[in-house]
Amino acid sequence: MRILIVGAGAVGGYFGGRLLAAGRDVTFLVRAGRGRQLDEHGLHVRSPLGDINLPAVPWVQASAIDRPFDLILLSCKAGQLDTVMDDLRHAVGAHTLILPLLNGMRHLDRLDERFGADKVLGGKCFVSLDKLDDGTIVHFNERDDLAFGARVGQDSGRLQAVAQALDNAGFAAQLSPDITQEMWEKWTFIATAGGITCLMRASVGDVVAADGVDLICDLYEECSAIARQAGYPPREPAREAFLQVLTQPGSALTASMLRDVERGDPAEADHVVGDLLERRLPEEVETPDRSVLRLAYTHLRAYAARRKREHQ
């Protein structure tokens, strides 16, 4: 199976690196600058589950793609999606499957419209990563789950082929029978984690230390209520696990959105937080002073407005 990894950032570099180290046929779709960095330094991952050091990494620019791939692992930021879809015009063929690992749900509609829903799988990952300036990818803990599955009745044989390609590749891959439910459950978690750590500019442990547990729980309940309205209420095991993580004393957990904000980079506020707010049914809309989610979104929008003004 020919696999195209879109981007060699934190997520794409980690899973693509694991697949490449396991002997899979992997090519990275990157810009010229990242390609030169890969040529000069290779791909390096520091992880408690085992480091990866790959001196030679196959990569390609969009203009050089001349035939379709079997599987495309999509790991870009939401703000890059339109450009990435243009880049994939020669990479997607009649039998290509696209596995997006973006946060939230909005990207699915856009991918469906561009390439057809029969080509777009559901997907999510739980992995805490960052990419350093030298290109090294740092994995912060021992969790690296990746789940995927059919959304619109994709052929089971093709799904099994993807499962086989991802199996025993150095990370925990699972073919899920209910991937849309799992994606909604993750969305409630990351909207809470991103909202609270960005709003407070602090780790989960610091918010807990500031008597912020009730605020965290209020935000999670607000996100869960929206998921419930959409028909995907978080199941009790997921709910218990997420709340335990979100209220853990001393936890160093921060959302990737906070790391983006602290670096002065664009944050996925609209895709992760704003889209969730937009899906709230009118009869359930709370007054602004009661909505922690709206407060977090306004905070992130103010950050984006300031960033735009200062970069003009």
Image (cartoon, rainbow, N blue to C red):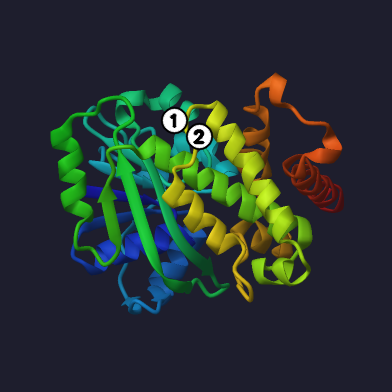
Q: Which mark is residue 99?
A: none
> How far across and how far down the image is residue 294, in percent?
76, 39
For residue 72, side relative to residue 271 (left or right): left
Q: Position of residue 220 (x, y in %)?
A: 63, 47
Q: Nearer the viewer, residue 284 or 306?
A: 284
Q: Going by the picture, which residue comes out furthest to the left?
A: 157
Q: Residue at x 46, y 35 (%)?
A: 85
Amino acid at dot 1: Leu
Q: Quadrant of residue 272?
A: top right
- Checking the image for residue 107, the label placed there is 2
**Does residue 169 appear left or right of residue 231 in this picture?**
left
Q: In front: 43, or 282?
A: 282
Mark linked to residue 111:
1
Q: Amino acid at mark 2?
A: His
Mark 1: give few (<14), some (14-19) or many (20+) Cα within 10 Å.
some
* Callout 1: SS: helix
How many marks the image carries: the answer is 2
Element carrying mark 2? helix
Q: Are marks 2 and 1 in contact (CB under 8 Å)?
A: yes
Q: Residue at x 25, y 69 (%)?
A: 21
